[in-house]
Amino acid sequence: MHDWKTAPRNGQTRQENLLTQPLRNFRAFNNPKLVTEGWYPLCSVKEVRRLTAKSFTILNQRVVVYRGESGKLNAMDAFCPHMGADLSNGKVIGEEIECYFHQWRFCGSGKLTKIQCQEKLPNGVQLRSYPVEEKYGTIWIFAGDKAPYPVPNPPGLDGKETVGIRIARRTLFVHHHIIMVGGIDMQHFGTVHQLDINFNFDISEKHEGVFDWKVGGEFPKLGWRAKLGRLLLGNSLDYQARFAGGSVVTLSYGTNSEKKQSGFKFPQVHIFWGNVPLLNGVSQSDIHIVMEKRAGIWGRIVNAALFAFTIALLFLLRDDDIKAFPYMRFDPKTIIPADQSAFRLISLLDKLKLSPWTPLDDDSKT
Ligand code: FES
Ligand SMILES: [Fe+2]
């Protein structure tokens, strides 16, 4: 077996075997040339301090994010509409950003507010601006003009106040849609994780482009994993997955945590990934652990313990799953009934709305 730790993460397999095993291109799913409308993580909140600016690239789109004096973040296209300097080289003054080159100034909505050398502003100068949010220690940009929903919570934390910790950034072996499908690929629970469970699943759509999977199944009677599972989680393993905008995936484990044998109620744990496509068909993933906000010293102790447990769970699942991806060229050619859950997600992701950052000449844009 190849060592997955040292296998290259460069997307090269997309170019291989094209003559003997032609690759099927989907409209949006696993399509390395486009960005779907959704929330994309840019960096840690600490990387854009008050009165500073930074630019980022998502696939072929450069955006600038700056934080005004009040602490409010703004995001817009990065190139100055005068002669194209990257605005992140400029200065943040109050709530506005001033281009370094000829000191044209813009407010957060992208409107030109001032020109150094003349009073009268030229007509029609407007930068495109984007919704931007800070959540779970990360700055997120919405790849579209208006965000129909905020950066989502994990499904088990709907309506609750949350805290989140950004724990790592990883380059994936494959496009992030493939990793998402892994979250609800029922066959691999047995083959990869040795969890011999007959899972049921139920799908709902929360907003346009936001899909929730409710998954559950009885633990088998035999085997140490099943016994440990029964002890900690009750007779069944339940979890919920939420996929938002093709960029975010979040899992809540232990939905049915009241059915304990031991009488001990294990709190739910939540993992949250924000993904960005890179140029070469692989992706980058920012990983977060999210919890319900708990007050007081006891609350802090509970959250610290939960955090440690979630990290352990993350390592356990990651080491199993990640070995499937090196040198993989994802292309579902033979679908059987057991692939139903995975295939439903593939078809839903394939219908997602495309971002204005997707090239117009791409015939997949609808
Ligand atoms: S290029 Fe920005 S002001 Fe001239
Ligand atoms: Fe897995």
Image (cartoon, grey):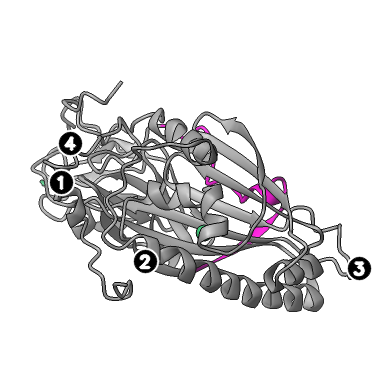
Position of 183 with respect to 14 (left or right) is: right
For mark 2, give the secondary structure: strand
For mark 4, give the secondary structure: loop
Relative to 206, does residue 279 appear above or below in the rendering? Answer: below
Dot 2 or dot 3: first in sequence order is 2
Q: Quadrant of residue 194?
A: bottom right
| Residue 263, numbered label | 3
Distance (Cα) linking label 3 and label 1 = 70 Å
Q: Residues within 10 Å of mark 2 (few under 14, many from 20)?
A: few
Which mark is in front, 3 or 1? 3
Dot 3 or dot 1: first in sequence order is 1
The disc labelled 1 sits on which kind of residue? Gln
| Residue 170, numbered label | 2
| Residue 116, numbered label | 1
Dot 4 or dot 2: first in sequence order is 4
Q: Residues within 10 Å of mark 1 (few under 14, many from 20)?
A: few
Asked whether the viewer can see residue 49, the reply is no
